[in-house]
Amino acid sequence: MEAPSTRKWGKVEIAADLRNQINHDDYEEGDKLPTEEAMRETYGGVSRGTVRAALDILTGEGLLLSKRPHGHFVRGRRRMTHRPQSDLQVRPSDAPKDSFLTELAEEGREPAQTIAVEIVKELPKPVADRLKLPEGENAVVRRRVRSLEGEPFLTNDSYFPLSIAQGTDAMSPVDVARGINRVLADAGHVQVRATDEFIIRMPTPDEQHRLELAPGTPVAVQYTTGFDRNGKPLRVAETTLPGDRHIIVYERPGLPDPEVDEGQ
Amino acid sequence: MEAPSTRKWGKVEIAADLRNQINHDDYEEGDKLPTEEAMRETYGGVSRGTVRAALDILTGEGLLLSKRPHGHFVRGRRRMTHRPQSDLQVRPSDAPKDSFLTELAEEGREPAQTIAVEIVKELPKPVADRLKLPEGENAVVRRRVRSLEGEPFLTNDSYFPLSIAQGTDAMSPVDVARGINRVLADAGHVQVRATDEFIIRMPTPDEQHRLELAPGTPVAVQYTTGFDRNGKPLRVAETTLPGDRHIIVYERPGLPDPEVDEGQ
DNA sequence: CAGTGGTCTAGACCACACC
DNA sequence: GTGTGGTCTAGACCACTGG
């Protein structure tokens, strides 16, 4: 896999060579790569810029991590091991429902969340498209950031028409144990249907900071829209899930099977 | 937003400036950016390498597309316009069920798919974990690539224990209109439950080629596991969805609401 | 201090699509 | 050909960490 000095080494070739060494057994997770200067010589005396371009490719794929000035290190393989998170899993409706904080505390983890409530008149476009606010009506947004063991885990911004949230616990910036749906239902707004939509994309720089994302980590953005019995949107939640910390799980119970085509 | 020549322009600053112009109204989807040489002058006479580094950042975020030698173009914002695909949407079980080909043909699009069937003894690890094949038993895999208007749309590899698929239409490399679930049910293997799991990650180089992914495009990998009434896995499907071509949609109908915490 | 990666420069050559 | 982006080079300076 080294350099027999026969090939011509460009950034793509060098990146491919390193990728092979990483995916095979030449490097273990956490290992340090040779210095840029050393690689320059290894790959036939290319310039340092070429080596760096190759390293940039791998960093962008999430395979490498740079700790200046210590060197480049192999960033753990895909951590697909992360268990499905209960707050994404759509559980049978008769399953026990607990709040995020108590639920995870029982598992011996260290959950934390921050909540801020705000009244806004400009909605993000995807939210505005779904909430379908009457012209001129304001909205309430509950912004939450959840962390596990100090690592941001997801952000969840829930938007409600002000006329619906007004005067309810949805306006208070604390955890609502009984669930926001229940709060709204008690105020006469019963959610009878919801849709989940997922968009897969690269994070914005802002999201990279808020969620402390490593380079090359994509996100799933989930839009949950809740409707009342008249089909009017009651709320829209925008949830941002770092790809390296989640497995999104849905259960499709019972017969008849929601059979689709050949079987998705 | 231009360059008052006051600031110092590095690749990060230039990328941020361009990102703003793209996210605000200065550029429309599909617009061509100035040439690298022009930007070099715009941003205080930096070197071309610096401009290119900035463009690389934005390309990595999926905001730009380079068409050599025509220039850099604004790559559509999230094309949220793409309608949810019926083969991902979980429809009410009494909804009409059509095959992928006829369904989209009616919409005036140009669907196409290739199907290959193969017997394998080595399963990908995520599939092996879910299919739980008895030691030594082989599996059948139906590999499909679906395209729309010439653009690869998804890949779907469905794995079955050989003992189950043996002698059924699941072994034939053609579209099965009545659905694979029905085929298996007719053979006595009734699927009564399924789980969907989604992993969000960057594509492998292999996937980039097969799906013709632009740089910076993440994928969702969906693992669908179907179980019979005894809880035995009947099939595992691995579906790879390019992030820029899909919105994944789930409907959660009816009361009681699958209420989750504060309302995911 | 020395060594590392992060950045920038100025210049060069190439492949390609268009005229 | 001309102009574009794609690539590579050789050199330079900086910021940071460690010995």
Image (cartoon, coloured by chain):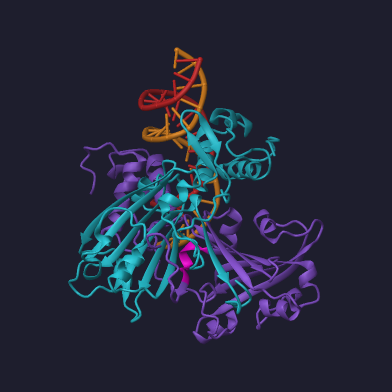
Chain colours: A purple, B cyan, C red, D orange
Relative to B93, does residue B66 appear above or below in the rendering?
above
Does residue A104 appear in the picture of this structure? yes
Q: Say which of A181 and A217 sits in front.
A: A181
Residues shaded magenta = A242-250
Residue B21 occupies quadrant: top right
The residue sitting at the left extreme is B136
Image position of B222 with respect to B258: above or below: above
Residue A34 is at least partly visible in this image: no
A144 to the left or right of A47: right
As rendered, which of A244 and A178 lies closer to the eye? A178
Q: Position of residue B51 (x, y in %)?
A: 54, 36
In the rendered structure, the answer to whether residue A205 lies left or right of residue A228 reads left
Q: Where does the image place residue B139, in percent across and percent down from the top left?
A: 23, 65
Q: Is residue A211 left or right of residue B181?
A: right
Q: From what the image shows, is residue B55 above or below residue B224?
A: above
Q: Position of residue A101 (x, y in %)?
A: 59, 81
Residue B134: x %, y % from top left: 22, 75
Quadrant of the frame with the C terminus of chain A: bottom left
| Residue A249 lies within the magenta run | yes
- The residue lying at 58 percent from left, 41 percent from top is B10
Give the camera-side residue of A71 and B165: B165
Asked if A3 appears above or below D1 in the picture, the reply is below
Number of numbered tags placed on the structure image: 0
Which residue is located at x 64 percent, y 38 percent?
B27
Taking the magenta stretch, the answer to whether it contains residue B223 is no
